[in-house]
Amino acid sequence: MNLNLSKVRKRVELLRNEIKKHDELYYIKSSPIITDQQYDELRSELENLESLYPELRDKKSVTQSVGTKVAKGFAKIRHTYPMLSLSNAFSKEDISDFLIRIKKLIGYGPDDKLELHCEPKIDGVSFSAHFKNEKLNFAVTRGDGTIGEDITNNIKAIENFPIQVDYDEEFEVRGEVYMSKSDFIALNEENSKNNKTLFANPRNAASGSLRQLDSIVTRNRRLSYFVWGGRIQDFNNQHEMMEKFKSLGFIVNGCKLVVDNLEDIISYYDEMCTSRAELNYDIDGLVYKVNSFELQEKMGNISRAPRWAIAHKFPAEYAETCIEDIFVQVGRTGAITPVAKLKPINVGGVLVTRASLHNEEEIFRKDIRIGDVVKIKRAGDVIPQVVEVKFEKRNSEVKTFIFPEKCPVCQSAIESFGDDIVKRCTGGMKCEAQIIEKLCHFISKYAFDIVGLSKQSVLQFYNKGLVKLPADIFKLVSANQTLEQPIEKWEGWGEQSVDNLFLSIEKSKKINMDRFIYSLSIRHVGVVTAEILANHFKNINNVMELIAKDDAVEILKAVNGVGEIIATSFIEYFKDPYNSQIVKNILHFIDVKQVIIVQNKLNSQLAGKNVIFTGVLEKYSRDEAQNIAKKLGAKISSTISKKTNYVIYGSNYGSKLNKAKEMNIKIISEQEFSDMVEENY
Ligand code: IVH
């Protein structure tokens, strides 16, 4: 790490801690000690540094809105259904594969026509807004996709956002808040005149402006929005729904198109590639969605994204810069990755300071040396890559990179295994870098999703001997009681942040099987594979039963989507006594939920029925229960009407149950629902 970066890192940490402290003073203790303007300045300085130094970004930083947990100061609201991400496509072939794949899912042949709604992918911050009795009821950020922040007042501060509509049924719109290129330039010009820090790009400016706790600040920053989805009764497809939203006064992007074949998709893409520079807002690709809601429903979701939609990203951007140094990083499975430290360069609005060199062979093949001028490529959110060396610019001072023979962290030998070109640190659980990376993975968003823990705090706990192994995370609460100086007294921590952390740890103990498998850092087992494995095994006992068999790999590799490499890696992991002890220790604290797969059954008791859920369910989350009910053919709504057939209730139910009784609507307890589900396993 060079001096400059370490100074910036210190400043970023200090800003994060300062902001945390002021949030606490303002919102919890109600006794701020700085003005709103001073607070805003701290935030925008941090936002700016985080975008200038991507290596210092941290998903848990106070600046993060999308994909992170709820910030203090905003009330939390649970989404009625998850706000998902999109899978990405980068080429015509990817789109062709996508079409074939989804057509197969619904029994269409490759040449059958399927309508797709094509629209720009707006580079902004997503929101969801709910309307009831013709009025805006509340608006929420995406948050972690399940729970977001209440930004009702901030949404109201956006010009042209209707808060009153001529439609009396409940409905929800989802879309993207953005700052136009011209408003972004004007805002930065003004900030520069007032000696305020500048935003790195319109997206950051939009995010920072929307998430102002004082909505007057939001109002003063000119924000815009486009609606790209939602839920409203009685519409059959995306096109009709968008037209309805438009007629209700919402801004819907005009560059949309419904097509039914690959050629038309590609012409739309080519056209948008050329015209995007003329738009007054940033788009980072296009989105193709199956138009029909019925077909969307049939296709369902995989992992955290719908199967029925895909983001077609724009081509990569290129730039030339110099490699100042090459160093290696140790990953959670010991993989040693060489990384080029670049002379910072702006590529398509993002400051790039590093590029992955993948492995030793890549450095050798491309003849990359320290001091070379190289062409780099940045595509979407992917880590920038070195495309080629500009040999004509090479001077005599370039230095060959010598791949280390020992791990820079634990000094164990670095070796390659079999014909794997990736070299690995052989330190295993002796290597602190691997342990820390594994711990960070364990708590990460798609694993145990423990918020309030950054890599920095994992390191803090590790160095104090509090967390050495995954299971230690669950012992933190009791360990804290025996500490001479409890965590809340440590620098950078406070009572509120410790409370939040402990709450998050507690919540994480009830975990889905796929997340649990993913959390273990098993080689070749990513999010998608973990889901396949979880759906196959259904519970941990079934895993243990298979491990005990001699032909475990043979059996597992026969599972659709698994194969030899994954099966071997998975079985070897569990057969290793050290790993199996780690798993046992974790299982001591947690409750891995049984996977329930309900086949699409359209002849169940719920088929074709209008169903609503009320109260708190024990066995399922609301989303799970609704998804299961949908698979059983039910239509889910949130309000009781004459059309409602069943009300399924949990504990702490509200007035809906009484209303249902008054209206003679059949009520079903969670247990009865659960029995129904079991009948349809
Ligand atoms: S549809 C389930 N349409 O991109 C489908 N998303 O990478 C969800 N986005 O979270 C998304 N423009 O915030 C959709 N026209 C568009 C979009 C769009 C921007 C954002 C959205 C989403 C993210 C996924």
Image: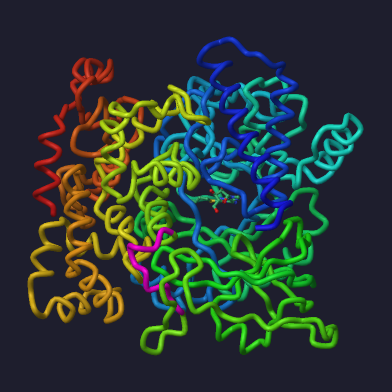
Residue 268 visible to an observer of this rendering: no
With respect to residue 213, does 458 lie above or below?
below
Q: 128 or 528, which lies in front?
A: 528
Give residue 399's position: percent from left, percent from top.
72, 81
Considering the image in quadrants, where does the N terminus appear?
bottom right
Q: Over which residues does the magenta segment extend?
A: 423-432
Q: 383 or 659, which lies in front?
A: 383
User: What is the quadrant of residue 353 in the picture?
Assistant: bottom right
Residue at horizontal 47%, vertical 70%?
Answer: 407
User: What is the quadrant of residue 548 in the picture?
Assistant: bottom left
User: What is the quadrant of residue 333 in the picture?
Assistant: bottom left
Residue 676 visible to an observer of this rendering: yes
Horizontally, is 564 left or right of 543 in the view? Answer: right
Q: 541 or 272, which lies in front?
A: 541
Residue at horizontal 57%, vertical 22%?
Answer: 23
Horizontally, is 13 left or right of 86 in the view? Answer: right
Residue at horizontal 73%, vertical 36%?
Answer: 45
Give residue 509's position: percent from left, percent from top.
26, 40
Horizontally, is 456 left or right of 657 in the view? Answer: right
Outermost residue toward the right in this view: 193
Considering the image in quadrants, where does the C terminus appear?
bottom left
Give residue 245's position: percent from left, percent from top.
59, 38
Horizontally, is 271 left or right of 237 in the view? Answer: right
- Residue 493 in magenta? no
Give residue 673's position: percent from left, percent from top.
15, 38
With respect to residue 306, does 456 lie above or below?
above
